[in-house]
Amino acid sequence: MTNTWCGGEFLSYKTPSALLLNPDQSFNSFGFDAEREYASLTEYDKDSEKYFFFQRFKMILKSSMEKRVHRKTQCTAENGISIDAMKVFTHCINYMREHLLKRIKYINYLISASITMDNFYFVLTVPATWDDTAKMFMREAAVQAGINNDQLLITLEPDAALVYCHLMHLESPDNETFLLETECGAKCMVLDLGGTSKITIHQLKEDGTSGELVSANGYGWGGTSIDRAFNKFLTSLFGERVMHIFQTDPEYIEDYFEFWHQFEVKKRAFEKKRNNNKDEHKETYQPEKNVFQIRIPLAIREIVAKLNKQGEMAAVINDAIQQLQYTNDLRFENGKLIMKSSFFEEFFKPTVEILINHLIKLYTEIGKDLKVILMVGFFSECSVIQEAVKKEFEGKCRVVVPNQAGLAVVKGAVYFGHQPDLITERVSRYTYGIETWPAFNETKHDKSKRVVMDDVPRCKDVFFKFFSKGDIIKPGDKKSYIFKSFRPNAKALDCGVFISNKKNPKYVDDEGCAKLGTLTIPLDGVDRNVYIKESLIFGDTELYVTACNCINKMVYKFTLDLLSEYINLS
Ligand SMILES: Nc1ncnc2c1ncn2[C@@H]1O[C@H](COP(=O)(O)OP(=O)(O)OP(=O)(O)O)[C@@H](O)[C@H]1O
Ligand SMILES: [Mg+2]
């Protein structure tokens, strides 16, 4: 069951990431509803500035989520005020949960069923470009939103997409399974083209599972770059001031949203028409004869009239068309901008070029082992992009665009909930280790770190690595090392656990390092020359440290809170 959301004339399987909170930070509305509410609010309510409106907050959060996320990571609303991102996510997830609850009630009523929330297992997806801790962050937000911790799986979006493609034959008998037939060791690139582009490379394994090979890369360009290009074009026609007022003046917010929804519908329809025409009349498709047209909102007309004493928008546009030498491609008629298809296709070109160049670069690095490029995300359904990728990689590797590529992540997440073992490994985004004070070595260690303890020269603050940034790790992975306590008189041994965003940190106070926590092992009443075995173990979402006294076999365990706001990678 996939929900359909309604944004005026625009029906979609996805609703925009828009959230409106009341001035007291309580929930107001989400998605298309939030856009509508915010628009009417800004127009009629003098207190509208006190409301918190977040739109495309995935992008607002992009930079902070790709850094280290913690419980107090902030997110800035349109009114310029920041609040906890945790709160924003909790409201969104809670909305989804309540929405589902209503649907369940309705289904129960319709078919006299007695489905409850306990019958559900939730899968939340996060972009692979997000930091390790973002998964933990989402778990905490989901739990705060009332989802039971035991009924929740957090997964990465490319993983879900891969699982979808692995199992898609269930949906359509025409689709072959592609993972099963692809030889073991083969590399597969998941190209998730949505509002932005995300690329991950996976290696397929014998048992049908796959591991993430290269950690994810995210780029600003994607479906939304076409919108940005079009916005730039409109700015060239009407001028910066007009577009700025259109975008920011509360009076026009509703028209602004409506215009971009209209553009979205037209963009998709244009693209489909172009595609169908091409299929039907392969030889006769002539972009010059087809047109793309879009109605210019009355709001823009009004703004132009206010700013421009002559007042006539048509005159302003026609002047601009002349000046910009668009006369062969573009005209303004009955309130609509009408342009040749070939002119509209130009808005796609820079995005296509950047994407293809990037893929070529990656292909040069990966080489012939790359067997499949898997295109998912709604922007992958766009034929301009598909054609470009297929053309470039023809004869080099398979380009697979699954049925309903746009829903691959969502549907894959559902499959994933049933078969979570399919993706097992991932690339560590950080280096993890502990602090040690080994014997001082003139050739290896810095003089400034030299200390003498019990007559032995030692090097303090050495970062002893357990897992390196870039290492392949999977839940349950464990690494251990045996140390000897070097301070016979100490009552306890403190084991500091550290994280670093560098691959080879030398000292725990190097740039990019931070302390995750300290495990204290009591040494009272034991032989203080004892050997201690320290282990770091990756859980699904957390990191455990254990220390075992090798003599008396006492084990001490400590769970590190990777979401703490006090961990600061300087
Ligand atoms: N047929 C189409 N032609 C051109 N662009 C399209 C088409 N269908 C969707 N898009 C674009 O794809 C983007 C939405 O894709 P999708 O829903 O997969 O993104 P998302 O998952 O919301 O974003 P992201 O993955 O970046 O967080 C939008 O920018 C939309 O305009
Ligand atoms: Mg997406």
Image (cartoon, rainbow, N blue to C red):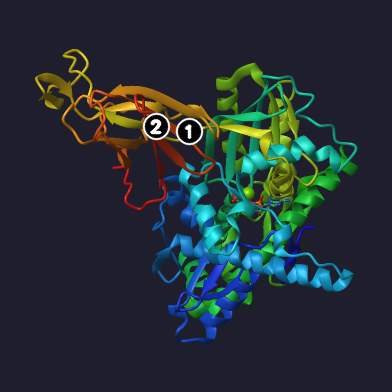
Determine which quarter of the picture holds residue 50: bottom left
Residue 514 in the image: state x and y as whole percent.
31, 40
- Verify CB contact (< 8 Å) between mark 2 and mark 1: yes
What amino acid is labelled 1 in the image? Ser
Task: Name the residue beneath numbered marker 1.
Answer: 428
Task: Name the residue beneath numbered marker 2.
Answer: 431
Residue sitting at x 46%, y 49%: 65
Q: Is residue 447 above or below residue 342?
A: above
Q: Secondary structure at mark 1?
A: loop
Residue sitting at x 77%, y 72%: 105
Number of numbered discs overlaid on the protein picture: 2
Farthest front residue in view: 525
Judging depth in this view, the residue of 203 and 116 nearest the camera is 116
Which quadrant would the C terminus be assigned to in this image? Answer: top left
Queried on whether the Cβ of the residue with tag 2 lies below 8 angstroms from ligand 1, the answer reads no
Judging depth in this view, the residue of 8 and 430 nearest the camera is 430
What amino acid is labelled 2 in the image? Thr
Kindly tell me whether residue 170 is visible in this rendering.
Answer: yes
Q: Is residue 452 left or right of residue 568?
A: left
Q: Is residue 440 above or below residue 398?
A: above
Q: Is residue 139 left or right of residue 287?
A: left
Queried on whether the Cβ of the residue with tag 1 lies below 8 angstroms from ligand 1, the answer reads no
Residue 231 in the image: state x and y as whole percent.
56, 59
Determine which quarter of the picture holds residue 465: top left
Residue 390 in the image: state x and y as whole percent.
73, 31
Residue 447 in the image: state x and y as whole percent.
12, 22
